[in-house]
Image (spheres, rainbow, N blue to C red):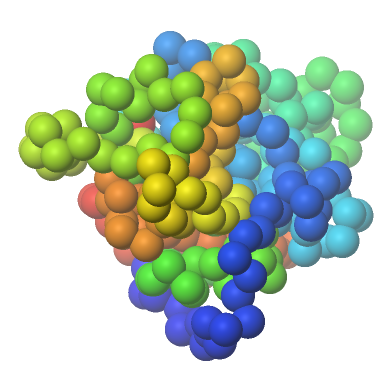
C-alpha cells in the first residue's frame, strides 16, 4: 500500500484531540482477544466500525462482526496471527455484517457462517434470518508521518497501527508508555507485530519534561491499562508504532478489483 499524500498545516493541528469526544456515539470501546493472538482481527474491526459510523454520519453504527472476519478470511493464521493487508482485502471484496448478525464465538477459521459472494450487497444473518447490508471499505491507504496521522484521525476517524510488544507492556497500568532500550533490542529480533487503534493524541508533563503521546486502543480487555486504552510516546516512532499505519474510506458497493493491494509481509499482527 502506497502512502497517501496528506497536505498538513501543522499550525492548525490542536495540541490534543480525542475521537471519543468528537464522535462519542461512533467510536467503539476496547475489546478482549483473550487467549487468541488475533489483534489483526480486532484492530481491523474497530477501525472499520468507527469509520462506518463517522463517515455514514450515524446511518450505520455499531461493532462489525469479528467472527465474520476471523472465520471467513482464509489464508490467515487464525489465533496465531494474520496479515492486515489480507484482512482489508477481504473487507474490500466481501464486506462484513454486524456483531448482532454474527456474534463472536471463536469458532474455527474456515467455518464461515456468512455466504461469501463478491457481488452481494446484502446477506442473510444465520440466526435471525433477517437481511443485512454488507459493509465494505474503499481502498485502504497508508499514512506516513506524525502530522499526517493527526490530520487524518481528526478528519476521518481512528487509524490502525502495528507495534512491537515488549514484556513490560503486559503490566502497563497507566502513564505515557515508552520502549526501554533493553527490551527494544530483544523486540527488534522478533518480527511479530501487535495491531492497535490510534484514536487521538495529547501532551503532558512528567518528571518535569513535556511529553507528546498517542491515545491508543488495545484488545486486551477493559481491566488492562487505562480501562483498555494506553498512551504511548508520540513523534519518536516508539516501538515502531508510526511505521505501518493504515486507514480507509467506506464503500457500500462491491469492489471491481479487490485484490489490487499487494500483501505486505511486514504487516503480520498477532
Decide if residue 165 is on the left or right side of residue 107.
left
Which quarter of the figure is the C terminus placed in? Answer: top left
Residue 106, position in %: x, y?
A: 55, 15
Q: Does 102 appear above or below 131? A: above
Q: Nearer the viewer, residue 186 or 85?
A: 186
Where's the N terminus, which quadrant?
bottom left
- Front one among 25 and 77: 25
Name the foreground residue: 215 vs 247. Answer: 215
In which quarter of the view is residue 269 placed?
top left
Residue drawn 43% across the image and 12% down it: 35
Q: Is residue 54 left or right of residue 136?
A: right
State the image coordinates of residue 113 (x, y, percent, origin top left).
65, 25
Q: Identify the residue at horizontal 78%, vertical 51% (top origin).
A: 21
In the displayed orientation, state which residue is furthest to the front: 208
Q: Is residue 84 left or right of residue 247?
A: left
Q: What is the tally of numbered marks visible in this picture?
A: 0
Residue 197 position, x and y percent, is 53, 45
Judge whether residue 268 can be spotted in this image. Answer: no
Q: Residue at x 63, y 70 (%)?
A: 14
> Quadrant of residue 121 in the image?
bottom right
- The vertical placement of 20 against 28, above or below, is below
Tell me if residue 178 can be seen.
yes
Residue 125 place in picture, x, y as percent:
80, 29
Is 251 or 255 nearer to us in this picture? Answer: 251
Residue shown at the point (74%, 54%) measured from the top left: 52
Amino acid at each position: 500500500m502506497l502512502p497517501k499524500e496528506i497536505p498538513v498545516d501543522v499550525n492548525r493541528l490542536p495540541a490534543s484531540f480525542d475521537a471519543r469526544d468528537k464522535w462519542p456515539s461512533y467510536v467503539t470501546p476496547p475489546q478482549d482477544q483473550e487467549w487468541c493472538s488475533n489483534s489483526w482481527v480486532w484492530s481491523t474491526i474497530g477501525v472499520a466500525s468507527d469509520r462506518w459510523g463517522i463517515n455514514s454520519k450515524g446511518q450505520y453504527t455499531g461493532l462489525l462482526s469479528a467472527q465474520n472476519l476471523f472465520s471467513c478470511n482464509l489464508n490467515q493464521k487464525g489465533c496465531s496471527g494474520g496479515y492486515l493487508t489480507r484482512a482489508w482485502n477481504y473487507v474490500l471484496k466481501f464486506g462484513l455484517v454486524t456483531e448482532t448478525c454474527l456474534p463472536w464465538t471463536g469458532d474455527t477459521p474456515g467455518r464461515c457462517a456468512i455466504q461469501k459472494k463478491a457481488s452481494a450487497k446484502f446477506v442473510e444473518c444465520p440466526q435471525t434470518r433477517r437481511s443485512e447490508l454488507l459493509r465494505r471499505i474503499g481502498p485502504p491507504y497508508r499514512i506516513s508521518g506524525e502530522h499526517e496521522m493527526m490530520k487524518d484521525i481528526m478528519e476521518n476517524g481512528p487509524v490502525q497501527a502495528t507495534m512491537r510488544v515488549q514484556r513490560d507492556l503486559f503490566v502497563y497500568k497507566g502513564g505515557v508508555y515508552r520502549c526501554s532500550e533493553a527490551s527494544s533490542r530483544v523486540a527488534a529480533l522478533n518480527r511479530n507485530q501487535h495491531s492497535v487503534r490510534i484514536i487521538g493524541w495529547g501532551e503532558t508533563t512528567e518528571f518535569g519534561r513535556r511529553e507528546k503521546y498517542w491515545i491508543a486502543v488495545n484488545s486486551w480487555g477493559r481491566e488492562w491499562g487505562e480501562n483498555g486504552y494506553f498512551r504511548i510516546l508520540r513523534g519518536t516512532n516508539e516501538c515502531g508504532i508510526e511505521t505501518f499505519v493504515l486507514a480507509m474510506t467506506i464503500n457500500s458497493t462491491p469492489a471491481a478489483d479487490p485484490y489490487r493491494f499487494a500483501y505486505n509481509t511486514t504487516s503480520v499482527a498477532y
